[in-house]
Amino acid sequence: FRQALNYAIDKKSIIQATARGEANPIYSAIYGPEWAINPNLVKYDLNIDKAKALMRDAGVKFGGDGTALWNDQPIVLTYLASVGDEAGKLGAELQPQLLKVGIRLEVKLVPSAAFLESAIAGDGDLIRNVGARSGVDPSTSALFYTCKAGWAELVMGYCNAKFDELQGRGLAASKVDDRKKIYNEASALLNDEAPSVFLYAPNVFIGVNKGLTGVKPSADPNYLTFNIQDWA
């Protein structure tokens, strides 16, 4: 069913609607640095027929009007996010997309101070989360997807011992080639099991005084000064 949701969602349309086109689609929580990107992941390009076929395989039935049914009841999911312009646009964009596979989506936006509590309480089925530093190093994906990570344990209910093992091996490895092989396997696992619907990584724009040299982009915009010793 999770893979079906991926095939039902048009990432290109979402990127245009929520990020004005200034983002790149991702297919796993491991999407950077460049050496860590697995080029062989399933892209889950929009495919309504395949989405419905996977839903049927999972036991979903469809009514005469196209409504998706589980135990003869309409499938209604709740999209949960903290209040914000992008979050609202994402919810509005997902509603008609999921309706094409017979799923009705309700949008619930809560104040940021109440978001985590609502997520842990299970107030949402599709919960918007932002892994702001996930592109810095593949090991950061452990903060969300290892068995004892708060988000995985308390919100998603996701646990895969193999992923945890790979994370441990990745941290212990020192050579980039070794880490690449390990994290490519971990990325493929997330891509296949789809504990999240991975959408996109936004482009980051940084303004620099024309008299300043040596500034280099970083995968984490919060650490723009990582090479400050080279600035002049």
Image (tube, rainbow, N blue to C red):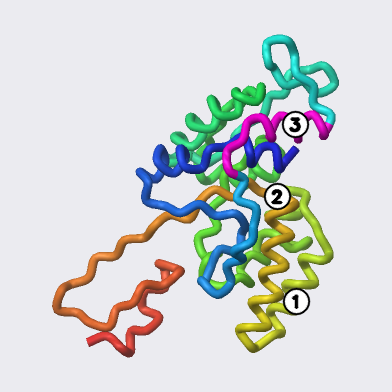
Residue to which mark 1 is pinned: 168
- Secondary structure mostly seen in magenta is helix
- The residue at the point 55 percent across, 40 percent down is 81
Above or below 30: residue 123:
above
Q: Judge left or right: residue 166 versus residue 19.
A: right
Q: What residue type is labelled 3?
A: Ala
Residue to which mark 2 is pinned: 194
Whole-percent x, y for residue 34 in the image: 51, 71
Q: Give 230 or 14, whichever is nearer the viewer.
A: 14
How crowded is the residue under tag 3: few (<14 C-alpha within 10 Å), some, or many (20+)? some
Residue to which mark 3 is pinned: 53
Q: Is residue 55 within the magenta segment?
A: yes
- Give the mark nearest the N terminus, 3 or 1: 3
- Give the mark nearest the N terminus, 3 or 2: 3
- State which quadrant residue 188 falls in: bottom right
Q: Is residue 85 visible?
A: no
Kindly report the distance in space between the C-alpha atoms of the residues bearing marks 3 and 1: 36 Å
Q: Is residue 31 within the magenta segment?
A: no
- State which quadrant residue 148 falls in: bottom right
- The residue at the point 72 percent across, 41 percent down is 2
Mark 3 touching mark 1, by CB under 8 A?
Answer: no
Above or below 82: residue 171:
below
Whole-percent x, y for residue 28 in the image: 62, 57
Q: What residue type is labelled 2?
A: Ala
Q: What element carries label 2?
A: loop
